[in-house]
Amino acid sequence: MKKCLVVVDYQNDFVSGSLGFSEAVNLESKIIEKIRKYRKSGDEIIFTFDTHGADYMDTQEGKYLPIPHCIKDTDGHKLYGKAADEMLDSDKAFYKNTFGSDELYQFLKQEKFSSVELVGLVSNICIITNAILAKTAQPETPVIVDATCTASHDAKLHQATLDVMGGLQIEVVNAK
């Protein structure tokens, strides 16, 4: 049975753009390494994209986080750096306008994997949300988050998020 790697929102705006932070930049080589490892093994690779429209500031999220980001068809919406070179046309891509991807959840309900691993951004928002959706879709499948392949702008919130995921039986590996 195949494994599945989900690269969550590793997009320009979260790394070097309007919501970027230095720890996000430092994840690039580790995320690339994961993608290549999964690809070499013939496993499934999925990319999620935080996707907003020009009306972002009028949305509920825009009211709570009034920083336009990941606007469709902008550079900020694109995958960051070398991750963009790693995405193949055959890879699944799910575009989501909220933290969790309903399409990812539905896909994972239909396709079974020996494990589902999530990497990318941001640990305390979209990583935890999609990890919970993966665990809900496949409760008997190990859902893994590598702590060295995700980050948050807030170190305390990042650590608390890793702890919460562990309590939800999401395997957090390489945590400090």
Image: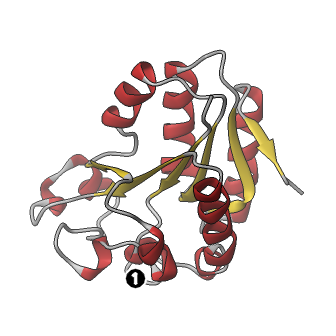
Residue 103: x and y in percent read 31, 35
In the image, residue 122 above or below residue 32: above
Q: Measuring 77% from the left and 43% from the top, which residue is drawn there?
A: 172
- Colour style of the rendered protein structure: secondary structure
Q: Name the quadrant containing residue 4.
A: top right
| Residue 66 image offset from top left, x and y in percent | 29, 66
Q: Nearer the viewer, residue 97 or 59?
A: 97
| Image position of 107 with respect to 86: above or below | above
Decide which of 58, 71 is in the foreground and name it. 71
At x 38%, y 29%, the residue is 107
Q: Nearer the viewer, residue 141 or 50?
A: 141
* Quarter in which the C terminus is drawn: bottom right
Q: Is residue 93 above or below residue 12?
A: above
Q: Residues within 10 Å of mark 1 (few under 14, many from 20)?
A: some
Seen in the image, is 163 located left or right of residue 153? right
Amino acid on which disc 1 is placed: Gly
Pick out the residue farthest to the right: 176
- The residue under the point 62% across, 82% down is 22
Quarter of the image holding residue 71? bottom left
Q: Is residue 19 visible?
A: no
Out of 41 and 85, give the one closest to the viewer: 41
Residue at the extreme left: 55
Query: Image height check: is 5 above or below 23?
Result: above
Q: Position of residue 7 (x, y in %)?
A: 51, 55
Q: What residue appears at the point 17 percent right and 62 percent down from the top-left corner?
A: 57
In this rendering, position of residue 70 left or right of residue 104: left
- Left or right: where does residue 13 sit relative to residue 142? left
Q: Is 68 on the left or on the right of 126, as rendered?
A: left
Q: Which residue is mark 1?
A: 17
Q: Is residue 165 visible?
A: yes
